[in-house]
Amino acid sequence: VVAIATTVPPLDPEDLKFFTAARLRAARLQPYLSTALFAMVPVVRPGYGTFGVDRWWRVYLDMDVARDWGVAATAGVLVHEAHHLVRDHHGRADRLKVRLDQARLWNLAGDAAINDDLVADDLPRPDRGIYPESLGLPPNGFEEAYFRQLVARRNTTAHETCGSGSGNVAAPGEIEDEPEQPGGDGIDDIDAVAIRRAVAHDVMVASRRGDAVSPGLARWARDLMSPQVPWRRLLRSTVGASVRAVTTRAHPDWSRPSRRADANLDLLRPGRRFHRPDVAVVIDTSASMSKRLLDAAATELNGLLHRSGIREVTVVVCDAEALRAQRVRRLGDLRLVGGGGTDLRVGITAAASIRPTPSVIVVLTDGDTPWPRSAPRGTTLIAVVIGGSELPKGPGIVSVRIDEP
Ligand SMILES: [Zn+2]
């Protein structure tokens, strides 16, 4: 009889009792993390020196160290390790193309972001000293931003690894088998996605109920549950599609007779010409709007129009006092100073009355305005709403929201 060694041996009764107590306490500290905490597969590793996770949701436990910490602080460490997994630090390191020699810095960035949140939640934990401020980083930051700053500074802070689950290189003693291999207990990528979504859902429910949820985790949950198409891509595809639709619509043009007409002068046919759309841009300069986003939107739109072969656009600036229409070559050249309190329908009507009638009217606004029920006749109205307001709907109206990243 050949005994097949299981790579994940069961915990002995005493370790199991301690681990179970710590895990229950962790689940009470952050109830919305329960799904993740109870999905983690404990692996006892004497001499490991600390706790760590691998990318398959196995949590490596040095139980001697844990007993020194005590149940309360161990619960805090389990929460920390679960955060590495829930926030997908392993996958994000891949997507960010973190090099092997930078993995340590990515681990640091993840620890700083996690611990920043745990401090905000007032969680007990042994002090590993990795916080944004101890690394000279601003609070409430994203892991990716922390990482870039640490790389730029060639940070040399010594730090114990949190394992491959944190996006670091595998710690000594990590099980190499994937979850589906015999004895390779763990969570595969598909289950991990489901667990993350369950946690994000629970975080949002808790947050709506008014429970204490650290800001970083709330932001993470919101992003996961409402994946946003980057607005630049959305704007490009929306404006691009409208411009293309007009450009490729061939118009009969009697000033350029078809060459086939030469053969039969009795039958004069119109030539066909591809129409370059006239584009008007209505800009709302209300004071509440993010100037940075407005500039970003104008710059993006400008590049877009130029690439589509549109050299000049008519801009209607709507502020509190007046409507001003002008032909410009570069949207970025406009000085947009705030006013506000304008009914943009007036600006849209003004844009539609320009001759020749623009086929595309783009509106840049914070959305704090009444909208027409439909696009003006013969035009496509593209509403670029800067900030969180509701998007207008109606025949001929296409909406894009531009938000903080
Ligand atoms: Zn860590």
Image (cartoon, grey):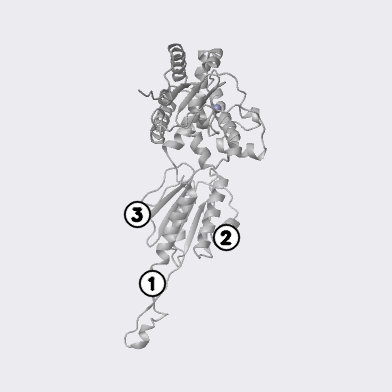
The answer to which image quadrant residue 159 occupies is: top right
Name the residue tied to disc 2: 330
Q: Is residue 384 above or below residue 109?
A: below
The picture places residue 318, in percent across and down from the top left corner, at 52, 53
Mark 3 surroundings within 10 Å by alpha-carbon count, few (fewer than 14), some (14 through 19), many (20 or more): few
- Residue type at the position of mark 3: Pro
Q: Nearer the viewer, residue 113 or 6?
A: 6
The answer to which image quadrant residue 42 occupies is: top left
Q: Quadrant of ligand 1?
A: top right
Mark 2 surroundings within 10 Å by alpha-carbon count, few (fewer than 14), some (14 through 19), many (20 or more): some
Name the residue tied to disc 1: 251
Please indicate, yes or no, whether residue 18 appears anywhere in the rendered image: yes
Q: CA distance from mark 3 to mark 1?
A: 23 Å
Q: CA distance from mark 2 to mark 1?
A: 28 Å
N-terminal label among 3 and 1: 1
The picture places residue 131, in percent across and down from the top left corner, at 61, 27
Q: CA distance from mark 3 to mark 2?
A: 29 Å
Report if the CB atoms under discs 2 and 1 are less than 8 Å apart: no
The picture places residue 313, in percent across and down from the top left corner, at 52, 62
Mark 2 CB lies closer than 8 A to ligand 1: no
Report if the CB atoms under discs 3 and 2 are less than 8 Å apart: no
Q: Is residue 397 above or below residue 210?
A: below
Residue located at (42% from left, 62% from top): 244
- Residue type at the position of mark 2: Arg
Name the residue tied to disc 3: 395
Mark 1 surroundings within 10 Å by alpha-carbon count, few (fewer than 14), some (14 through 19), many (20 or more): some
Q: Which mark is residue 80?
A: none
Q: Nearer the viewer, residue 250 or 152?
A: 152
- Residue type at the position of mark 1: His
Report if the CB atoms under discs 3 and 1 are less than 8 Å apart: no
The answer to which image quadrant residue 114 occupies is: top right
Look at the numbered disc 1 and give the secondary structure of its residue.
Answer: strand
